[in-house]
Amino acid sequence: MKINHVTKMAILFVSLLLIVPVTSVAVDIKSTVIGDQLKKKKQSESNKYLTAKEAYAVLQENGDNVLFIDVRTPSEVEFVGWTSLADAVIPYMTNDFDEWDEKKHRYQKVINGDFPIVFEELVMAKGFNKNTPIIFMCRSGTRSGKAATLATKLGYTQAYTVVDGFEGDKAKEGADKGHRVVNGWKNSGAPWSYKLDGSKILFNQ
C-alpha cells in the first residue's frame, strides 16, 4: 500500500508527540519594520514583520525555540537556493502547469490546500504550540505574508513574515534594474546553498 505524504506526516506527528513535550519558551524578537510602511501585498494580519537580517539574528540567538518555514515551491529552492536553517519547505502556493499567466509571463500559482495540514503537523511534531514564534519566508515577502495571515487565523500568536524574502526586491535603476539584488536573505550575507535536504521538503502533490 502506498502511503502519501500527509499520512507520513501524521505518523511522524503521533510518534514524536509521545516523546516530545509541548513547550513554549519566551523569545525576545525585535523588529525595525512598520507594517503600515509596507506595500499592501506584503502586509499580514499578524502585523509581525522581520527583515532577512533580523530573521537571521533571531535564528542565531534562539533557533531551537523558533520555527522557520520556507514557503516557496520545491523548484524555487532547487534552482535558486535555500538556507539549511529552515526547519522545512512547505509551499504556500504551487504551480499550475496547465494555466499560463500572460501578464506575469509564467505559469499560474494556486493555493496549496495541504499547507495548513502539513504546517500544523510540523508544529506539533517539533513540540511547539500556538505561542511559538514562527517565521515564514518566501521569495520577496508576499506569500510569506499570506502564510503568516493564515497561521494567525489558525490561532498562532507569533507568526512573522520576512518582508524582503530570500531573493530580495528588484532594483529600480542601474545596471541591475529589474533584478532581485536589493536586500533579502540571499543578498544579506546570511548562509545559503544549492545543496538541499530532501527530508525538509514537505510537499504533497
Image: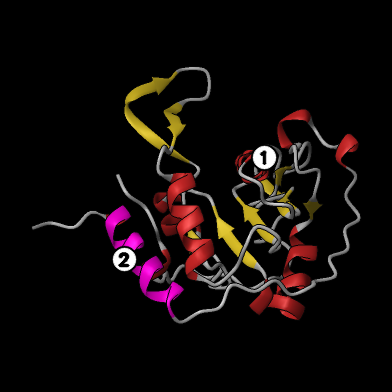
Q: Residue at x 65, y 61 (%)?
A: 186
Q: Is residue 159 left or right of residue 21?
A: right
Of residues 10 and 133, the one nearer the viewer is 10
Q: Residue at x 89, y 35 (%)?
A: 36
Magenta range is 6-18
Q: Position of residue 138 (x, y in %)?
A: 59, 49
Q: Position of residue 22 (x, y in %)?
A: 59, 72
The secondary element bearing badge 1 is classed as: helix
Can residue 75 be seen here? The reply is: yes
Q: How many marks?
A: 2
Of residues 187 and 123, the one nearer the viewer is 123
| Relative vertical location of residue 99 with respect to residue 198 in this rendering, above or below | above
**Mark 1 and mark 2: span between their CA atoms?**
27 Å
Q: Position of residue 2 (x, y in %)?
A: 12, 56
* Furthest residue toward left: 1
* Residue marked by disc 1: 149
Q: Residues within 10 Å of mark 2 (few under 14, many from 20)?
A: some
